[in-house]
Image (cartoon, rainbow, N blue to C red):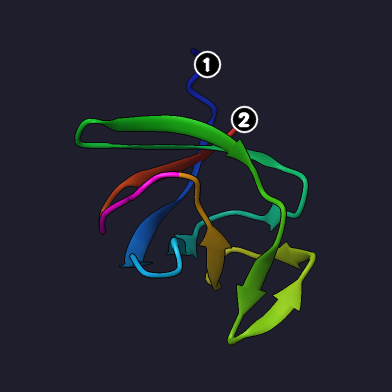
Amino acid sequence: MEEGKLIGKVTHYFGKIGVAVIQLEDTLKVGDTIRIVGGQTDFTQTIESMEIEHKKVQEAKAGESVGVKVIQKVREGYKVYKL
């Protein structure tokens, strides 16, 4: 599986709604494919929507924290790569 480019890490996870908060070190757009790696977890998914402060956005830049719906449970500190 390709490694991709490290673009951030998970800083929070809301289990009830399946949303990860990702602190970005690079740009992320709706439609990008990401890979989340940490512990026993390693999966890829496409970004279908993301939010900053409860507002839907199409793109987020380095330094921003975005909420992204994830298909698996994640934990703080997991690394996020863009493929």
Residue nearest the viewer, comparing 59 with 25: 59
Q: What stretch is highlighted in magenta?
A: 72-76
- Report which quarter residue 21 is drawn in: bottom left
Q: Are marks 1 and 2 in contact (CB under 8 Å)?
A: yes
The residue carrying mark 2 is 83
**Label 1 Cα crowd, 10 Å radius (few <14 / some 14-19 / many 20+):** few
Q: Helix, strand, or loop for circle 1?
A: loop
Q: Is residue 13 left or right of residue 17?
A: left
How many numbered marks does the figure carry?
Answer: 2
Q: Which circle marks residue 2 in the picture? A: 1
Q: Is residue 75 magenta?
A: yes
Looking at the image, residue 59 lies above or below residue 57 = above
Q: Does the magenta stretch include residue 43?
A: no
**Label 2 Cα crowd, 10 Å radius (few <14 / some 14-19 / many 20+):** some
Locate residue 22, reporting x and y percent. Answer: 46, 62
- Report which quarter residue 9 is drawn in: bottom left
Q: Which amino acid does label 2 sit on?
A: Leu
Q: Which amino acid does label 1 sit on?
A: Glu
Q: Which residue is drawn at 37% across and 58% down?
A: 10
Locate residue 79, reporting x and y percent. Answer: 36, 44
Looking at the image, residue 30 lies above or below residue 61 = above
Locate residue 48, reporting x and y percent. Answer: 72, 53
Q: In this view, does 18 lie to the left or right of 13?
A: right
Q: Main secondary structure of the magenta part?
A: loop
